[in-house]
Amino acid sequence: MGILIALGFPFVTHAQRLEVARFSAADMSGWKKKSFVGETRYRLREDGDKQALYADSRAAASGLFREIEVDLDQMPYLHWTWKVENLVNGGDERGKQGDDYAARIYVVFSGGLLFWRTRAINYVWSSRESPGSTWPNAFTANAQMIAVRSGPESLGTWLSERRDVKADYQRLFGSEPGKIVAVALMTDTDNTKSAAVAWYGDIWFAAN
């Protein structure tokens, strides 16, 4: 549901890697909560020999965001790991009543002084849209959706993702991206009144 927007620029770099989330090290520094409807429960938990962020949403929509500045000319690739336990049931994901996802990663771009031009890309695990498909968010055309994963295949399995954010932005919005000002994550189920459980691993930007 909706779009998470944040301003400010703390970040951590290690060589050619800019760390956004280090959940594997039990590091939640810099992450803040944004609530829309109810509370998705987020907490660090162990999953076998792996530590990650656990998300449990029951007819709720709240997310976590971290304010960050990224130079996409230097580090255009976003990397992350995630695992989804179950899909969101019901609803057309292209409409307001179905704008729920078991897992999504937001990248938020500044509109500069024109705050109403703030844009976002949502990388989602879709329940039914085919992988690679794109569509405008039902609540704002300034947010575009990309189905990175879809359906029940690979549920319960840790997966690693890699996206060229700069290229995705150019394709979706037909222009050069502004500054990245935040990265966010959300497991939300408020519109469909359903439930979903997901896990988020580390998130980082890199040159390739």
Image (cartoon, rainbow, N blue to C red):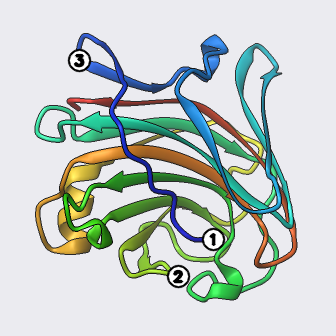
Q: Marks 3 and 1: which is nearer the front?
A: 1
Q: Secondary structure at mark 3?
A: loop
Q: Amino acid at mark 3?
A: Gln
Q: Secondary structure at mark 1?
A: loop
Position of residue 54 in the picture relative to residue 204 (left or right): right
Check disc 3: other Cα within 10 Å, few if <14, some if 14-19, many if 20+.
few
Residue at 28% across / 46% down in the picture?
180
Q: Residue 146 location, x and y as percent?
A: 44, 66
Position of residue 194 in the picture relative to residue 140 (left or right): right
Q: CA distance from mark 2 to mark 1?
A: 8 Å
Q: Secondary structure at mark 2?
A: loop
Against 48, residue 59 (above or below) is below
Check disc 2: other Cα within 10 Å, few if <14, some if 14-19, many if 20+.
some
Sequence-wise first label, 2 or 3: 3
Q: Amino acid at mark 1?
A: Met
Sequence-wise first label, 3 or 1: 1
Q: Amino acid at mark 2?
A: Phe
Residue at 86% across / 67% down in the picture?
59
Residue nearest the viewer, comparing 26 with 31 = 31
Against 18, residue 130 (above or below) is below
Q: Which mark is residue 139?
A: 2
Quickly name the residue at label 3: 16
Residue at 51% across / 46% down in the picture?
184
Q: Which quarter of the picture shows residue 118?
A: bottom left
Q: CA distance from mark 3 to mark 1?
A: 33 Å
Circles 2 and 1, Cβ within 8 Å, touching? The answer is yes
Q: Residue 102 location, x and y as percent?
A: 71, 58
Q: Could you tell me if residue 109 is visible in this image?
A: yes
Quickly name the residue at label 1: 1
